[in-house]
Each structure stands twice: as structure tokens, then as C-alpha cells.
Image (cartoon, rainbow, N blue to C red):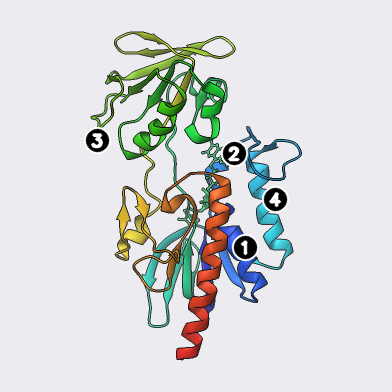
Amino acid sequence: MKKVIIIGYGPAGVTAAIYLKRTGIDSLVIGKDLGALDGYSDLVENYYGLQEPIEGNKLIQQGVDQAKKLGIQVITDSVISLKQSEMGFTVQTQHKTYEALSVLLATGKTRQTLNISGFTKFRGKGISMCATCDGYFYRRKKLAIIGCGAYMQHELEYLNRISSDVTVFTHGNELTCEVQNTVIKDIVLSFKGDEKITHIVTDKGEYPIDGVFIALGVPSSVDFASQLGVIVEKNNISVDENYQTNIEGLFAAGDIIGGKLQIAKSVYDGMQAADSIYSYLKNKSKKA
Ligand SMILES: Cc1cc2nc3c(=O)[nH]c(=O)nc-3n(C[C@H](O)[C@H](O)[C@H](O)COP(=O)(O)OP(=O)(O)OC[C@H]3O[C@@H](n4cnc5c(N)ncnc54)[C@H](O)[C@@H]3O)c2cc1C
């Protein structure tokens, strides 16, 4: 029986594990990959203490290595189900089943990519997956956002603050939220340009553009949480001020609870969640 299982070894999960370790609580951290920044070799430069920008996947790997160096058990496996048990929770991965008194969900958000010609070529050269991260470089430019739902709306709010010319491309999907911007429902066929992107090509025409933000979906890494009856709103797991979900002993932190989808915020969440898990376990042991 583990005291805590942390699902996810991104910034939120690893920070929680580090803070728990300092209170004397050993956690088991299970992740399937490096999360949002897995395979992301572009540079992160907006995180505290970086003397030089660092490749995204390197930063996350350093966090994992830091946890391991501190003696925290970190394993790579996919969690496929989470169930309540008599003592707490049963976490089933592809390879093993674990029991824990409490669980922290730090599973981030899966962002969809696009299987569209030019996407890979212009990613980082006019195509971005994150408005809050890269929007700053596109101030007052002619922008497009590709998406149709709540996630797109979240990213659009930010883009509308930095540019008065943002067009929404739904890529053939129906819009499931309200926006004030121009909406184009064409299917996007390719991205065109030279060194940088210059045009979006659709089934109906070509549109000049300086920057494209992809905000399709944000499909759920909350599936197994939902199976437990966890309250999920707009694809974010709902937590109280202690980062606890509506299920006692089940906590969540990082991108998965919404708000700013940034490393700094996930680190903060992880630290706060660790505090709450510590108090939860202390109270639980008093009652036992
Ligand atoms: C392209 C891109 C660029 C970005 N650039 C920046 C930037 O420059 N600056 C910045 O501050 N932020 C940036 N971000 C955002 C930042 O990466 C996220 O906010 C941050 O990583 C979220 O941390 P997290 O711990 O909540 O989740 P993640 O980092 O996404 O980690 C989630 C973890 O959960 C695991 N997981 C998920 N499901 C399962 C499962 N079923 N079983 C086991 N493990 C599971 C994953 O494997 C991973 O280990 C960027 C994001 C993207 C996509």
C-alpha cells in the first residue's frame, strides 16, 4: 500500500513528489511520457531561473531526474483505470496494479496536432500550439486560430488581447462556443510560406496570415477520473481550495485543473497539492 500515487511526471506531478518527500512522505510517480512537452525541442524561456533558454523536453526530463536523485520512485507506465477501494484507491497500469491511500492526478492535457501539409515544417515558424506561451511574439499581427470549442475560446481570449485581427478557422467543425471574431468554417488543406508561414490554404481559398495557433479539442486525459464520478467542467477536473476533487483523497493539479496552461502555474499547483495531501494523510492516520 502506497501513501500517495502521483499520476503524471510533468511539472505538477514532480513538484508535488518533491514537496511530499520533504515532509517525509514517499510517493510513487507514474507517467507515460514527458507530457505536454514530450518531443518538444523548441525552447522554453519564460520559466524562472533559466540562464539560457532550454529545450522543452530537456527541462521536463531534468525534473524527472531531479526527483529520482532525491530517491523518489518514478516509473514509466500508462494508467488505464482508477477505482476506489476500501482503504483508498486502486490504480491499474498497463503492467501492474497498485493500492494507495491517496492519489494526485497530474496528467496534463493532451493537445491535438494537425495532420495537415506544412504543419511540421512551420511549427515554431509561425505555427504555435500555445497562445499564452508564444502569443507575445505575435503582437498586433494578423492571426488565425484553428479550433471550435472551449479550449479554442480560452486561447482566443488571450490572442484578442494582443491583436485586433484574429480569425477563427473551425476546420470544417461546428463552433460549440460563442466568439465575436470572424469565423471561417473551411477545411484547412495546407500551410504555405517560405522561411515562415504566410498563408492558410483551405478548400475554398487562400488567406494571408502571420501566425497560426492550434487549439483543437484538448481531448480528455480525464477519462479514468470521470469513470470515478469526478466532477469535470469544460474538460477541467474541478477541485476545491485544497486541490481535492469531489472524491475524498483524490487530488488534482496542473493543466488538468485548467487556468493558465503554463509550467509556473503547474509547479505552484503541485506544491499546494502536496501540502493538502500531507494534511489529508495526517488526519487520516489520526482517525485510524
Ligand atoms: C508546444 C507547447 C509549448 C509550450 N511551451 C511552454 C513554455 O514555453 N512555457 C511554459 O510555461 N509552458 C509551456 N507550455 C505549457 C506547459 O508545457 C504545461 O503547462 C505543463 O507542462 C503542464 O504541466 P503538467 O504537469 O500539468 O502536465 P504535463 O507536463 O502535460 O504532464 C502530464 C504527465 O501526465 C502523464 N500522463 C497523462 N496521462 C497518463 C496516463 N493515463 N497514465 C500515466 N501517465 C499519464 C504524462 O505522461 C505526463 O508525464 C507548452 C505546451 C506546449 C504543448
- Where disc 1 sits, the SS reads strand
Q: Nearer the viewer, residue 285 or 9?
A: 285
Disc 2 marks which residue? 39
Q: Amino acid at mark 2?
A: Gly
Q: Secondary structure at mark 4?
A: helix
Query: At 54% from the left edge and 25% from the top edge, which residue is drawn?
Result: 123
Question: Outermost residue toward the right?
Answer: 51
Q: Residue at x 57, y 25 (%)?
A: 124
The residue beneath circle 3 is: 176
Mark nearest the camera among 3 and 4 is: 3
Number of numbered discs overlaid on the protein picture: 4
Q: Earlier in the sequence, mark 3 or mark 4?
A: 4
Marks 3 and 1, how far apart in space?
39 Å
Residue 115 locus on image (x, y percent)? 42, 27
Q: Is residue 202 left or right of residue 284?
A: left
Bin the neighbour count of mark 2 within 10 Å (Cα to Cα): few under 14, some 14-19, many 20 and up.
few
Tag 2–tag 3 contact (CB < 8 Å): no
Q: Earlier in the sequence, mark 1 or mark 4?
A: 4
**Image check: 168 left or right of 210?**
left
Residue 74 - label: 1
